């Protein structure tokens, strides 16, 4: 039993490090690819965000209305309204998109 506990401890530590690194990557990915429109705080109050009607993702109600799958699809495929492109399709990897969506969730107040 002690051997099992000794093996579980390093595994838990590795998982914690992986989770922290994943969240950090999400923040970096968001900063590099999303802040121009959505802003550092997710409010969408940037010049470009205001022009395109970016949602305020710091608002819990707005976040509740968008599932992770919807957010992923919007980033991956982009967004259009009528013939106007609101957000271009992303060339990010699926892992980077998931990480940026996870980071976006931390902006909710």
Image (spheres, rainbow, N blue to C red):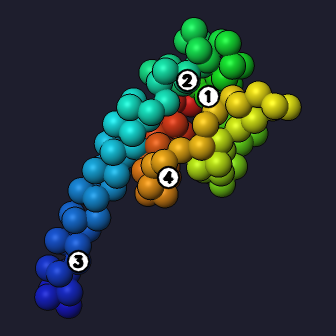
Q: CA distance from mark 3 to mark 1?
A: 37 Å
Marking on residue 67: none
- Furthest residue to the right? 82
Residue receiving disc 1? 57
Could you tell whether 25 is left or right of 78 in the image? left
Q: Nearer the viewer, mark 3 or mark 4?
A: 4
Q: Which residue appears at 23% of the width and 73% of the height?
A: 11
Residue receiving disc 4? 98
Residue receiving disc 3? 8
Residue receiving disc 2? 38
Whichever of labels 2 and 1 marks the residue nearer the N terminus, that label is 2
Q: CA distance from mark 3 to mark 4?
A: 27 Å
Whichever of labels 3 and 2 marks the residue nearer the N terminus, that label is 3
Residue 49 higher or lower than 15, as above or below: above
SS at badge 3: helix
Residue 5 higher or lower than 96, as above or below: below
């Amino acid at each position: 039993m002690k051997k099992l506990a000794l093996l579980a401890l390093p595994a838990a530590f590795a998982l914690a490090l992986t989770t922290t690194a994943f969240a950090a990557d999400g923040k970096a990915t968001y900063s590099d690819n999303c802040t121009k429109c959505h802003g550092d705080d997710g409010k969408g109050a940037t010049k470009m965000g205001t022009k395109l009607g970016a949602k305020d993702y710091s608002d819990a109600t707005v976040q509740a209305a968008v599932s992770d799958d919807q957010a992923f699809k919007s980033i991956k495929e982009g967004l259009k309204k009528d013939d106007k492109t609101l957000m271009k399709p992303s060339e990010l990897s699926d892992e980077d998109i998931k990480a940026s969506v996870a980071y976006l969730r931390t902006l909710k107040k």
